[in-house]
Image (spheres, rainbow, N blue to C red):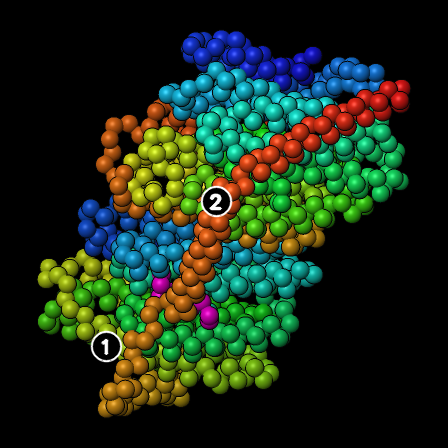
């Protein structure tokens, strides 16, 4: 059998290659910590139901990093994404169900796009191996189709505009432990796919520019949506979409210029680790705070500042390193668009800082839910916090070297600080602003345009159903009137068919006799 | 003579069932189950022969110049195996399902005759023989569709007969016309019409007539109208006939027509393959979209079947070896997946009188094994690896791209997403807490439950073993290879 056939189960290949290593470590850590957190915090009666979905999702979500061939990758991707529906709808509320339905619809579309991209790449390169496929697709006439399909699939996973709503929807209603996994890991599979599937260094510059612009637009747009939304986790969801927009910029950098590919891939990995850990820490922290009162609560809120500052990219945080790697990558390109993106990049941190302030405000308002001292959750959360603080600095790679060298230079510290200061200033100004401006908050429900889209689809469906029903009724009435006539017509038709059948049979017989 | 037996044994069982009458239930069941067991053993033997390169065939002179021929080649045996093996499984299910029903002699008699006709279609050696069994299949299915005798059933039956006889007439005109210009031509891998390939206009019309004939049973839009209506039949009929034997006879006819009568080359050079592919592509998308909106469980499955049948038609019409092999493998794979689903539909109806998706809350707890089997089949149908549907979808997609038809690949993946769209709501509805919650005694009649679990497990096993010799994938590639000049993947 040739290499592009689907084999039996024994042909699935997994490998811990240099691309896989950081993602595997990240996914395994996040799913494991989140799993323990979920096991401890979920009421005993609901645990089985939650873990029936959590375990397959975790298995897929961890092994996807190791998948070395197209079929394993698709399998793990599906195994992670589809059962996540059960985590999202766990609360069984109407909102959770709606979120689950939208999530599953977009996931199904994303899966289809991914499969199409994979099949084209497999056929064009004659190999099932992911590394060979990404290398070889650059020279194929179907390169653009494959890249467009892969990018569309990735966009659905990481929530670029206009589907940013998929991220807040996928963890606003999810129980905290599971939400921490969903916040940290699945979108990073999109980042992994950027490295594994996109034809690096062999696309036209216009593609690179378009992808970078989309990434930048998402970074800004999702931040705006997030500051206007209603729940702490929803803010975090939009923040993820905004951050993944930055990762998409790195993916754009990798497309056209071969020399920039290592830098771009380094930035993608740096961002994946930084953001995966920080976002997971924020989701867990939000839950821990809601379980505490008094001084413990104040300390927890203070500790929550670490991942928040990291996302903003404050000096000495993981975000500082990740943003440095991204800037280095964008800086490697020349031309109007890359230079404009480079100039606008620091401004995205204003949006992130605003998001984090909003998140803090919403979390502080949350009332304490239990008074029992949650020791294990705090311990687990501390573990993630420690990882946020340390991992990007000590990870053996090239993408953090430059950042470590400049960590203490005043210029870079200032670059990392000013967007945050602007956001704080804006926030203070808003406190003294008229009430009308403050009412702007809370106008975006988690899911934004996706909710509108769903409502539109439902309305169309109802309209169609209404039409069909009226149609049926008329048909029924008519049948009552012209029933006998119809039956007579049918009888005639059947008789006619039988007669013509016999006639043709006779013709056949004559032909047979004639040709003898 | 051996080549006739897969057709004759079920036929004899059918006649014996009529002779035994309504009262002797045990004898009737014994006869049918024994006939199924013998047929399965026999087909297995023929498969071993065919795999070793000996095609057993036999011809029966009918009229001067006309004869009936049966030939146990790998292509036909794939369909015959699917029909015969699933007949055995369905018999067990049907004995449980029809436990309290009336007119069981008529039911099981015609049931066996249908399988006889389907095996006849599978092994028929030339267009005329195929036509004869195709017509017998139409006629023997009618009593099963109208079995309940309700006005609704009778109306659906009339519709079915109307479509079937119309299609049969078109097919017959095509077959007769072809006999006039080319004589009686046995199916030959790669095409049998090389001698008359210059009569392009006539060959085009004949192809259209024959596609119209096969298209009725293959539910190619706009010839699909009878299938959703025919869902009024008892569940075993929907399961075996409207997911396996009858509808697959249609697509099998198209496979024979394209690969072994015209041949992929002639079908392409006459410009016949592309229009057929376009019809199939439209059918896949339109039927899938309609399936999204069906609340009636069996109708939802029926529209899914219409879409999936056109998977096979489209794969065949692409005239690329891998797509053609994928189409043939999908004929077997879809049979296993869809029979699981129709078994489920019948079981929830017979046990709890649930007919609609919206009535399902609580079902997952009330009938866990049944719904788990359904879930596996549903994800297999959506093409999630490593389940069985993925293997054929992968082959069809790869074949489409190799052929340069990226549009066909996009149709395949889009319909996979749509399949998630129309299958998952069934599962989410069943998973909600609801009225069926408290488990009262057994899940359902074990004679219905275990066939469901068997075919459900088969969708996993066939998926895991898709790359091994003897799997439908391997079998289909071996069977299709001669039509493409001895192609090997």
Q: Which residue sits at x=36%, y=78%? A: A352
Query: Is B197 situated left or right of A420 in this image?
Result: right
* B240 vs A208: above or below: above
Which one is nearer the viewer's eye here, B225 or A178? Answer: B225
Q: Which residue sits at x=55%, y=61%? A: A150
* B272 vs A147: above or below: above
Find the magenta span and give its range: A161-170
Helix, strand or loop status at disc 2: helix
Which one is nearer the viewer's eye here, B316 or B121? Answer: B121
Query: Is A455 situated left or right of B199 in this image?
Result: left
Query: Is A163 situated left or right of A515 in this image?
Result: left
Locate residue B213: give its quadrant: top right
- Image coords of residue B51 (percent x, y): 66, 24
Helix, strand or loop status at disc 1: helix
Q: Chain of mark 2?
A: A
Locate residue B332: give its quadrant: top right
- Image coords of residue A460 (percent x, y): 46, 60
Q: Quadrant of the N terminus of chain A?
A: top right
* B146 vs A456: above or below: above
Bin the neighbour count of mark 2 within 10 Å (Cα to Cα): few under 14, some 14-19, many 20 and up.
Answer: few
Foreground tag (1 vs 2): 2
Whole-number angstrom distance, CA of label 1 to CA of label 2: 61 Å
Residue occupied by mark 2:
A476
Bin the neighbour count of mark 1 within 10 Å (Cα to Cα): few under 14, some 14-19, many 20 and up.
Answer: few
Residue A311 visible in this rendered orientation of the protein: no
Q: Earlier in the sequence, mark 1 or mark 2?
A: 1
Residue occupied by mark 1:
A361
- Image coords of residue A498 (percent x, y): 69, 27
Q: Chain of mark 1?
A: A
């Amino acid at each position: 059998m040739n290499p592009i056939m689907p084999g039996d189960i024994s042909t699935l290949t997994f490998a811990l290659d240099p691309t896989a290593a950081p993602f595997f470590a990240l996914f395994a850590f996040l799913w494991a910590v989140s799993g323990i957190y979920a096991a401890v915090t979920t009421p005993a009666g609901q645990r089985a139901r939650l873990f029936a979905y959590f375990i397959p999702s975790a298995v897929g979500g961890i092994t996807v990093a190791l998948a070395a061939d197209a079929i394993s990758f698709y399998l793990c991707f599906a195994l992670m994404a589809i059962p996540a529906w059960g985590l999202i709808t766990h609360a069984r509320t109407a909102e959770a169900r709606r979120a689950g339905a939208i999530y599953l619809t977009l996931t199904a579309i994303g899966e289809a796009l991914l499969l199409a991209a994979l099949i084209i790449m497999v056929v064009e390169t004659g190999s099932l191996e992911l590394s060979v496929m990404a290398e070889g697709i650059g020279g194929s006439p179907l390169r653009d189709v494959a890249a467009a399909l892969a990018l569309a699939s990735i966009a659905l996973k990481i929530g670029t505009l206009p589907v940013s709503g998929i991220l807040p929807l996928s963890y606003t209603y999810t129980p905290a432990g599971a939400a921490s996994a969903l916040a940290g890991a699945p979108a990073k599979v999109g980042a992994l796919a950027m490295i594994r599937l996109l034809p690096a260094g062999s696309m036209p510059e216009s593609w690179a520019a378009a992808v970078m612009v989309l990434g930048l637009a998402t970074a800004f747009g999702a931040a705006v949506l997030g500051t206007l939304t209603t729940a702490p986790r929803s803010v975090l969801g939009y923040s993820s979409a905004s951050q993944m927009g930055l990762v998409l910029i790195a993916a754009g950098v990798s497309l056209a210029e071969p020399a920039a590919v290592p830098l771009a891939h380094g930035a993608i990995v740096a961002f994946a680790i930084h953001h995966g850990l920080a976002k997971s820490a924020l989701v867990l922290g939000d839950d821990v705070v809601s379980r505490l009162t008094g001084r413990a609560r104040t300390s927890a809120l203070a500790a929550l500042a670490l991942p928040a500052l990291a996302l903003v990219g404050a000096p000495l945080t993981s975000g500082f390193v990740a943003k440095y790697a991204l800037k280095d990558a964008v800086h490697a390109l020349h031309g109007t668009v890359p230079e404009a993106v480079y100039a606008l990049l620091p401004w995205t941190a204003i949006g992130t800082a605003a998001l984090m302030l909003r998140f803090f405000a919403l979390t502080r308002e949350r009332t304490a839910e239990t008074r029992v001292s949650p020791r294990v959750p705090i311990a687990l959360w501390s573990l993630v916090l420690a990882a946020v603080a340390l991992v990007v600095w000590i990870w053996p790679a090239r993408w953090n070297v430059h950042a470590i060298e400049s960590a203490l230079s005043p210029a870079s510290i200032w670059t990392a600080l000013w967007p945050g200061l602007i956001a704080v200033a804006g926030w203070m100004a808003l406190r003294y602003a008229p009430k009308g401006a403050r009412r702007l908050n809370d106008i975006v429900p988690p899911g934004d345009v996706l909710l509108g889209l769903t409502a539109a689809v439902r309305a169309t469906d109802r309209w169609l159903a209404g039409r069909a029903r009226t149609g049926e009724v008329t048909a029924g009435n008519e049948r009552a009137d012209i029933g006998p006539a119809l039956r007579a017509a049918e009888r005639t038709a059947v008789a006619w068919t039988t007669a013509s059948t016999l006639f043709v049979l006779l013709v056949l017989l004559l032909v047979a006799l004639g040709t003898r | 003579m051996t080549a006739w037996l897969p057709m004759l044994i079920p036929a004899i069982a059918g006649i014996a069932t009529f002779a035994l009458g309504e009262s002797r239930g045990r004898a009737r069941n014994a006869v049918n189950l024994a006939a199924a067991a013998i047929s399965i053993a026999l087909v297995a033997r023929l498969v071993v022969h065919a795999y070793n390169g000996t095609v057993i065939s036999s011809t029966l002179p009918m009229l001067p110049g006309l004869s009936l021929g049966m030939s146990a080649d790998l292509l036909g045996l794939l369909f015959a195996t699917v029909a015969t093996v699933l007949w055995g499984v369905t018999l067990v299910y049907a004995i449980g399902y029809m436990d309290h029903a009336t007119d069981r002699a008529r039911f099981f008699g015609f049931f066996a005759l249908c399988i006889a006709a389907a095996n006849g279609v599978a092994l028929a050696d030339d267009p005329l023989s195929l036509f004869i069994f195709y017509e017998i299949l139409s006629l023997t299915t009618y009593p099963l569709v109208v079995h309940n005798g309700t006005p609704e059933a009778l109306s659906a039956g009339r519709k079915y007969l109307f479509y079937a006889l119309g299609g049969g007439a078109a097919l017959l005109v095509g077959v007769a016309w072809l006999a006039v210009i080319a004589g009686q031509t046995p199916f030959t891998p790669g095409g049998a019409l090389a001698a008359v390939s210059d009569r392009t206009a006539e060959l085009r019309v004949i192809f259209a007539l024959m596609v119209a004939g096969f298209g009725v049973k293959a539910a190619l839009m706009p010839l699909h109208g009878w299938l959703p209506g025919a869902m009024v039949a008892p569940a075993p009929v929907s399961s075996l006939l409207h997911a396996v034997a009858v509808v697959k006879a249609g697509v099998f006819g198209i496979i024979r027509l394209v690969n072994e009568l015209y041949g992929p080359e002639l079908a392409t050079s006459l410009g016949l393959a592309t229009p057929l592919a376009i019809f199939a592509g439209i059918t896949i998308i339109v039927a899938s979209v309609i399936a999204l909106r069906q609340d009636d469980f069996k109708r939802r499955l029926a529209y899914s079947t219409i879409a999936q049948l056109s998977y096979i038609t489209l794969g065949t019409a692409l005239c690329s070896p891998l797509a053609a092999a994928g189409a043939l493998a999908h004929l077997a794979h879809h049979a296993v997946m869809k029979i699981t689903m129709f078994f489920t539909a019948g079981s929830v109806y017979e046990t709890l009188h649930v007919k609609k998706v919206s009535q399902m809350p609580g079902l997952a707890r009330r009938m866990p094994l049944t719904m788990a089997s359904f879930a596996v089949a549903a994800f297999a149908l959506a093409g999630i690896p490593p389940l069985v549907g993925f293997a054929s979808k992968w082959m069809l997609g790869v074949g489409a791209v190799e052929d340069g038809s990226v549009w066909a690949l996009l149709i395949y993946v889009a319909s996979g997403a749509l399949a998630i769209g129309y299958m998952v709501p069934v599962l989410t509805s069943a998973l909600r807490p609801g009225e069926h919650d408290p488990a009262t005694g057994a899940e359902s009649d074990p004679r219905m439950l275990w066939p469901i679990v068997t075919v459900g497990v088969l969708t996993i096993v066939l998926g895991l073993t898709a790359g091994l010799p003897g799997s439908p994938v391997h079998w289909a590639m071996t069977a299709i290879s001669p039509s493409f000049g001895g192609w090997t993947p």
